[in-house]
Image (tube, grey):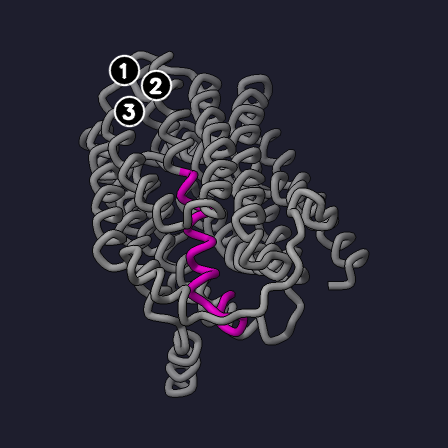
Amino acid sequence: MIAKTFSLYKTSFTGLSKEAWLLSFIMLVNRSGTMVLPFMTLYLTSKEMHRSLSEAGFVMALFGLGSIVGAYFGGKFSDKIGFYKVQLFTLFGGGLMFIVLGQVKSYPLICVFTFVLSMVNEAFRPANSSSIAFYSTAENRTRSYSLNRLAINLGWAVGASIGGLVAAFDYELLFWVDGVTNILAAGLLFYFLRPNIQIKKEEVKEEVVPEVMSAYKDKTYLWFLVLMTLFSSCFIQLFTTIPKYFRDDMLLNEKYIGLIMAINGIIIVAIEMVLVYTLEKKNKNTRWIIIGLVMCACSYFSLLIPGNAKFISLVMILFITVGEIMAMPFMNVFWLQRANDKNRGQYAALYTISWGIGNTAGPFLVSALVDASSFKVAFIVLGFILCVSAFGFYKLNSNSKT
């Protein structure tokens, strides 16, 4: 049994390109410093900054709005000047912006710099998605993206766990760590994947490119993006309003919050690659997305159950983690199967924009809902929206026959 399990793990990681591994390593370095986003709401509502949840929600909404603008230009420039240059600029520029944001204490300036930081930082995503697609084949593309997600979540586990300790000591240090790791990732990208390597790869790669179709005219994809926006507006709560609920209502400290956030990344690292390798063979991608959304809905409903705070918070993290593992890799597959080398930047940009819209509307609307009612009401609404999204994917699957 152990030998069979080991063989399955080994096989799931076999056949990926050297560049895919390098990109994932660079992503690991970058995401190991991810400390600002999961603790931003706690930072703004801390005694030092003394901002309300609604004000913190507005800042996080600006972060989401910046990601929309950044994603659009990131995808546009990836198709025009190449994904390498966009990744290099956004990593280095984003690193500098994290450091600057940490020094700003004025609320209006925090709003401005958060928007600019997000715009620069999130322009990285469509370029990175395009680069992974370029350095993979149709046979290993899903696993290449899952390897990248593995790096993101392993980095997240490290960043969140260390971030909890750092936040308990000094919130300002979070911005320095996040900034420095961004800049270090830019240096690694420049050293390992310089343009001459990319040009060489382009010269030898041969691929039949299908007829170019504008992502903006793909009606099925546009409906998919609507559902993605609903999902992302709910999922982002894990990093915005939920940490505040854990701290202020469940009376959990920053160290414990960082620990259970790290569990999310650890579980993903442990099982996602193998699970994706096993499930993708069944060719029922939309079914896995639906199951994942239902699991995420259960995660919010679980917070309505009375009981020990540490146990309930752990159950919530387990539900949303399994839901994320089931849904997100196959959401990537959906848009990848509709894109080609000529329009991949468009598809990647719209995919990132849908996340950005959710990340903008979600924190703002849910924080306002909490202020007007309670967290319990918000959890019911979030669970309901996720169930509606799951039904939407069921109908999308029925109509498209995919």
**Marks 2 and 1: in contact by CB < 8 Å?**
yes
> Which amino acid type corresponds to the residue marked 2 in the rendered image?
Ile
**Marks 3 and 2: in contact by CB < 8 Å?**
yes
Residue 369 visible in the snapshot: yes
Mark 1 falls on what kind of element?
Answer: loop
Q: Going by the image, does 122 lie left or right of 184?
A: right
Mark 3 falls on what kind of element?
Answer: helix
- Locate the C terminus by quadrant: bottom right
Q: Which residue is tagged 1? A: 105
Q: Which residue is tagged 3? A: 101
Q: Which residues are magenta?
A: 122-142
Image height check: is 57 above or below 37? above
- Locate the N terminus by quadrant: bottom left
Mark 2 falls on what kind of element?
Answer: helix
* Crowd around label 1: few <14 · some 14–19 · many ≥20 (10 Å): few
Q: Quadrant of residue 394?
A: bottom right
Residue nearer the viewer, 151 or 189: 189
User: Residue placed farthest to the right in the image?
Assistant: 399
- For the image, the number of numbered tags is 3
Residue 359 numbered tag: none
Q: Which residue is tagged 2? A: 110
Residue 232: percent from the left, percent from the top?
Answer: 56, 41
Estimate the spatial distance between the alpha carbons at disc 1 and disc 2, rounded to whole Å. 7 Å
Image height check: is 334 above or below 7? above
* Crowd around label 2: few <14 · some 14–19 · many ≥20 (10 Å): some
Residue nearer the viewer, 264 or 148: 148
